[in-house]
């Protein structure tokens, strides 16, 4: 019997292998009781239903503008005049100018020194002339009315306005812009100085300087604009807004050209001072057509009885005896 079993073992093994590969299970495995089916059904994991999310349109959030970004400057209103003045100052960088502030006789109006020389004020003057504004004429007309209100240092030695040099001095430009109502407060905030503005500094103890703010930002501080000026090497653009002590901040536009400052009228006792202001010549030309009012003082008989050879001197003597009201009426006509 044992020999027969040993001979049949390979056959039994082959039969078991065929049933495993084919996937057919024996009858005992397939025949499950009702209890086993219920237990298997309870242990079975239910299939999860797929979750479908609602598709929403993406929201567009505005990024907060940084202080140095360009979007932050879009809120600043810029006038067309300021942009034109900034561009005119930038064109001055193309010219070769040697720093020379000597006294030169020039034409009036629209007179200018040779194009190959100039100082810091010539950058401002030539930039405004690109826009049709002649600072030589504007400053001279205002100084002719109120000469004593402008700074007059002894080193200049002036007794009347000089259209050749008055507009090329920083002190006179500062006074002129202030009288026209173009002065702005001086601050340490970079955003207060916009393109087209004028800034004056005190470089040394007695060395004033002026420049134009242009539409180019600084690399170190994007909130700060650059300056076009001439400090000795010709017109150049630099980041010098807060390098020197600021003495003035101005925004002079075409609207200020029409803003004429009121005339300064002097009393009858200061006729000699009025002559220095250029008012005596205008008053003497209109003296013949003048009709005095009731406030006219009688002429001094002693002065009138003296023979006068110079007719201009006789007119000045008559003006000296006029009252303040008569002088004002005479100059208004």
Image (cartoon, rainbow, N blue to C red):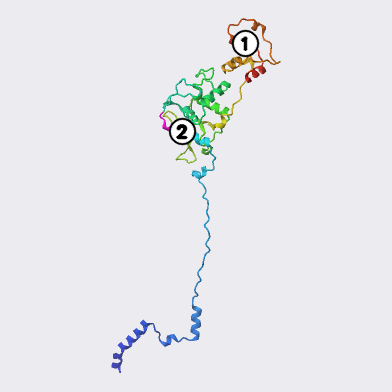
Front in this rendered view, residue 48 or 278: 278
Q: Residues within 10 Å of mark 2 (few under 14, many from 20)?
A: many
Residue displayed at 47% across by 33% down: 88
Across and down, in percent, residue 210 comes to: 49, 29
- Please give the residue where the numbered disc 1 appears in the rendered image: 317
Front in this rendered view, residue 330 or 154: 330
SS at mark 1?
A: helix
Indicate the quadrant containing the C terminus: top left, top right, bottom left or bottom right: top right
What's drawn in magenta, residue-wise?
Answer: 90-96
Instruction: Judge whether residue 189 is colored magenta.
Output: no
Indicate the quadrant containing the N terminus: top left, top right, bottom left or bottom right: bottom left
- Please give the residue where the numbered disc 2 appears in the rendered image: 228
Q: Answer yes or no: is residue 82 visible.
A: yes
Residue displayed at 51% across by 79% down: 42
Magenta: main secondary structure equals helix
Q: Answer yes or no: is residue 146 visible.
A: no
Across and down, in percent, residue 74 comes to: 52, 43
Q: Is residue 22 left or right of residue 282?
A: left
**Quadrant of residue 325 within the rendered picture:** top right
Q: Residues within 10 Å of mark 1 (few under 14, many from 20)?
A: some
Give the alpha-carbon distance from disc 2 to disc 1, as whole Å: 52 Å
Q: In front: mark 2 or mark 1?
A: 1
Q: Are marks 2 and 1 in contact (CB under 8 Å)?
A: no
SS at mark 2?
A: strand
Give above or below for 236 relative to 312.
below
Across and down, in percent, residue 228 comes to: 46, 33
If you read the primary sequence from the N terminus, does the residue marked by circle 2 or circle 1 appear first?
Answer: 2
Front in this rendered view, residue 134 or 19: 134
């Amino acid at each position: 019997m044992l020999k027969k079993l040993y001979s049949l073992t390979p056959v039994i093994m082959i039969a078991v292998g065929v049933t495993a590969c084919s996937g057919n299970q024996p009858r005992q495995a397939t025949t499950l009781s009702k209890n086993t089916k219920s237990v298997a059904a309870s242990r079975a994991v239910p299939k999860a239903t797929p979750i479908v999310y609602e598709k929403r349109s993406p929201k567009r959030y505005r990024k907060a503008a940084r202080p140095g970004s360009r979007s932050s400057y879009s809120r600043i209103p810029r006038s067309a005049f300021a942009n034109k003045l900034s561009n005119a100052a930038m064109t001055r960088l193309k010219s070769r100018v040697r720093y020379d502030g000597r006294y030169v006789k020039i034409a009036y109006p629209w007179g200018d020194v040779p194009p190959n020389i100039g100082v810091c004020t010539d950058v401002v003057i030539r930039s405004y002339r690109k826009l049709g504004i002649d600072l030589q004429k504007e400053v001279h007309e205002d100084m002719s009315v109120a000469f004593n209100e402008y700074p007059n240092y002894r080193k200049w030695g002036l007794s009347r306005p000089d259209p050749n040099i008055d507009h090329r001095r920083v002190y006179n430009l500062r006074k002129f812009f202030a009288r026209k109502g173009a002065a702005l407060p001086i601050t340490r905030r970079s955003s207060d100085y916009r393109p087209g503005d004028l800034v004056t500094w005190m470089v040394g103890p007695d060395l004033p300087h002026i420049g134009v703010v242009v539409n180019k930002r600084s690399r170190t501080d994007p909130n700060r604009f650059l300056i076009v000026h001439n400090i000795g090497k010709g017109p150049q653009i630099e980041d010098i807004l807060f390098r020197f002590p600021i003495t003035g901040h101005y925004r002079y536009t075409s609207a200020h050209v029409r803003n004429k400052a009121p005339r300064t009228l002097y009393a009858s006792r200061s006729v000699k001072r009025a002559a220095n202001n250029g008012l005596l010549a205008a008053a003497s030309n209109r003296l013949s057509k003048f009709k005095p009012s009731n406030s006219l003082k009688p002429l001094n008989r002693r002065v009138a009885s003296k023979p006068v050879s110079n007719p201009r001197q006789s007119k000045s003597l008559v003006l000296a005896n006029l009252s303040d009201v008569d002088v004002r009426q005479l100059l208004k006509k």
